[in-house]
Image (cartoon, rainbow, N blue to C red):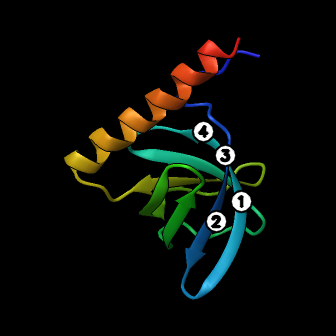
């Protein structure tokens, strides 16, 4: 199965308010993610996501969940965006070498 950098799947923990949710990253880019969570969140909900092997990212729910997948927009600056792009590319390149 071929995967691009926006289709990297990883486990994640998501925190909002004081609750902790478990989820799985379905799509990831330098500015956003689509995460399958064990509970839907309302649009605008502030959230911090801890993505396995990548780190923690703060953002907000940017739309209604679809099929259990919640869209998240990250609140990151250009430096953190560049870092995330580099990390995504490392994962993508390692997957390409494993083929």
Q: Which residue is mark 1?
A: 23
Mark 1 and 3 residues: CB-CB less than 8 Å, in contact? no
Marked residue nearer the N-terminal end (2 or 1) = 2
Picture coordinates of residue 28 (x, y %)? 53, 40
Q: Going 45% across and 27% down the picture, which residue do you hit?
A: 89
Does residue 66 sit above or below 58 in this rendering?
A: above
Q: Please tell me which residue lies in front, 42 or 53.
A: 53
Picture coordinates of residue 8 (x, y %)? 62, 34
Picture coordinates of residue 49 (x, y %)? 53, 63
C-alpha distance separating marks 4 and 1 = 12 Å
* Residue 83 horizontal side relative to residue 34, left or right: left
Q: Which residue is mark 4?
A: 27
C-alpha distance separating marks 4 and 3 = 9 Å
Does residue 5 sit above or below 78 in this rendering?
A: above
Q: Image quadrant for the N terminus? A: top right
Q: Which residue is mark 2?
A: 13
Q: Secondary structure at mark 1?
A: strand
Q: Secondary structure at mark 4?
A: strand
Marked residue nearer the N-terminal end (4 or 2) = 2
Q: Going 38% across and 42% down the picture, which residue do you hit?
A: 84
Q: Nearer the viewer, mark 4 or mark 2?
A: 2
């Amino acid at each position: 199965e071929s995967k691009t950098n926006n289709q990297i799947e990883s486990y994640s923990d998501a925190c909002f308010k004081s609750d902790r949710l478990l989820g799985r990253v379905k799509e990831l880019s330098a500015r956003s993610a689509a995460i399958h969570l064990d509970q839907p969140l309302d649009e605008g909900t502030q959230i911090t996501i801890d993505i396995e092997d990548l780190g923690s990212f703060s953002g907000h729910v940017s739309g209604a969940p679809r099929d259990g997948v919640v869209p998240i927009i990250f609140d990151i600056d250009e430096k953190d965006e560049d870092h995330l792009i580099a990390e995504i590319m490392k994962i993508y390149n390692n997957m390409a070498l494993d083929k």
